[in-house]
Image (tube, rainbow, N blue to C red):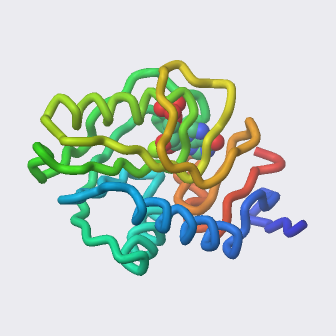
Amino acid sequence: MKTDKMNAHSIRVLFDEKTIAARISEISQEMAGADLDDLLVIPILKGSFVFAADLLRAMHRAGLVLEVDFLSLSSYRAATISSGQVEIVRDVESDVSGRSVVLVDDILESGRTLAFAKDLMAARGAKTVSTCVLLNKPGKLATELAADFVGFECPDLFVVGYGMDMAHSFRELPYVGVVENP
Ligand code: IMP
Ligand code: MG
């Protein structure tokens, strides 16, 4: 298995580029089969930006017509332990009322981030709010939330890369991996 040396860190690859691309193509086919009219896709920043960039283009290839807006939420605050509190760092500009909203995030862990965003969009009158995550981390759910579209089941490890960070590092890695010596 591939291991990258990033300065003093060794990163063990969990999901490589090809595997991620293939799964994203499958997810977008699933989405194309769902009833998503007047579709607004909302990536939750920052962690989802790489996943969203690939997913949006795959959705286009799958025939979906959509708009994109961004919601920036914060719960981790440059640490690997969640504070449990979710804050809006930057809100969407779009009116979501009556629309099919798909929220995109990197990881579903406690579910607090997505539950917060889902409640927010529902309270604003979205017709439907679906959720799509690249990774589903088992065992830590603090809410009832199950994502509608899931890339992969993720082992209970702190993962980085493909947009996900550890204290702002590693977002640029083209794969998802685990820091072996954090
Ligand atoms: P939740 O609110 O507990 O579901 O946490 C979701 C957010 O926590 C994700 O959007 C990530 O930004 C962050 N997160 C959770 N686990 C990891 C991880 O292993 N690596 C990087 N970020 C993570
Ligand atoms: Mg995040």
Q: Residue at x 30, y 53 (%)?
A: 42
* In-front residue for pair 11/38: 38
* In-front residue for pair 107/150: 150
The image shows residue 10 at horizontal and vertical percentages of 82, 58
* In-front residue for pair 137/127: 127
Quadrant in which the N terminus appears: bottom right
Q: Residue at x 32, y 55 (%)?
A: 35
The image shows residue 171 at horizontal and vertical percentages of 55, 60
Report whether 111 appears left or right of 35.
right
Labels in figure, total: 0
The residue most toward the right is 1
Report whether 49 appears left or right of 134.
left
The image shows residue 96 at horizontal and vertical percentages of 14, 46
The image shows residue 177 at horizontal and vertical percentages of 73, 56
Quadrant in which the C terminus appears: top right
Q: Residue at x 23, y 45 (%)?
A: 90
The residue most toward the bottom is 61
Report whether 155 appears left or right of 49.
right
Q: Is residue 31 above or below residue 138?
A: below
Q: Is residue 95 above or below residue 28?
A: above
